[in-house]
Amino acid sequence: MKKLIKNILSIFRKCKSARSNFLIVYFKYLFYSIFYQKKILSHQKTSIKGVKNISTKKILNVGVKYVGFMLPSDRTFLNIQGKLILKGNYSIGRGCRFDIGKNATVSIGEGGYINANSKIIIMHDLTIGNNCAIAWDCQFLDEDFHTINYKNKITRPKKISIGNNVWIGAGVKIYEGTIIADGCVIASNSIVRGFFNKENTIIGGNPAKVIKENVSWD
């Protein structure tokens, strides 16, 4: 009983801080727990299609985190037709849009978060390592949805791979075939496509390139 009351109070405080409707959030939490055996705390304006395709044994927070420029009326939508695999507690910001295709997989490590208004549009494969901080208004896209043909065209892998402890600044766009090594920092508003295999670098620009090496961040 004490554990239950502690859990309810924790959810209540989180809802109050994030300007979320406690009754709706808690009812949805019970619904996901009973019918899907998943611990999902979702804001009242969150819609999740494909809950059964989410794999998590810890707590997934969706829109239940205070961000000063977001309104309680802002909507979040997760369309999970493929697989969303979460290896630890995780937070998805309010206003985010996920579209994970039928044959696609998005795998996210322990720790870290995705901040408000970011978009994950994945038709193939996205891997995000442990303790990655993804700021607001970011986009991950691994499919062009159209084909351009020309002579000597090189076909590259579609998969996006983000290492451990990577900080991705606000407004960054990451496109198909991108690899980012551990410990890197991606400067705000950068357009990233390509292989960045050297750890602990600052990457930035359009198109993105290595700006500094041997960096660390907290």
Image: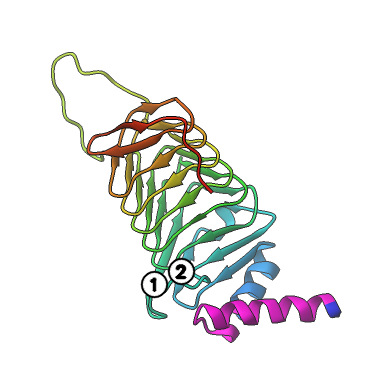
Q: Hey, which quadrant is residue 29 in on the image? A: bottom right
Asked whether the viewer can see residue 81, the reply is: no
> Residue 140: horizontal and vertical position, in percent?
36, 46
Question: Helix, strand or loop at disc 1?
Answer: loop
Furthest residue toward left = 150
Query: Viewed as shown, does residue 141 lie left or right of 46?
Result: left
Q: Nearer the viewer, residue 45 or 166?
A: 166
- Name the residue that disc number 2 marks: 47
Q: Is residue 19 magenta?
A: yes
Q: CA–CA distance between discs 1 and 2? A: 8 Å
Give x and y (percent) for residue 18. Answer: 51, 77
In the image, residue 156 sits, relative to residue 80, either above or below, namely above
The amino acid on which the numbered mark 1 sits, given as a three-letter code, is: Arg
Quarter holding the N terminus is bottom right
Count of numbered badges drawn on the protein: 2
Depicted 12 relative to depicted 137: above or below = below
Whole-percent x, y for residue 44 in the image: 49, 78
Which region shows up in magenta?
3-26
Q: Which mark is residue 75?
A: 1
In the image, farthest residue toward the right = 1
- Between residues 47 and 75, which one lies in front from this camera angle? 75
Callout 2, which amino acid? Ser
In the image, which disc is placed on residue 168?
A: none
Q: Nearer the viewer, residue 107 or 66?
A: 66
Verify CB contact (< 8 Å) between mark 1 and mark 2: yes
The spot of residue 166 in percent (x, y) is: 49, 42
**Picture quarter containing residue 31?**
bottom right
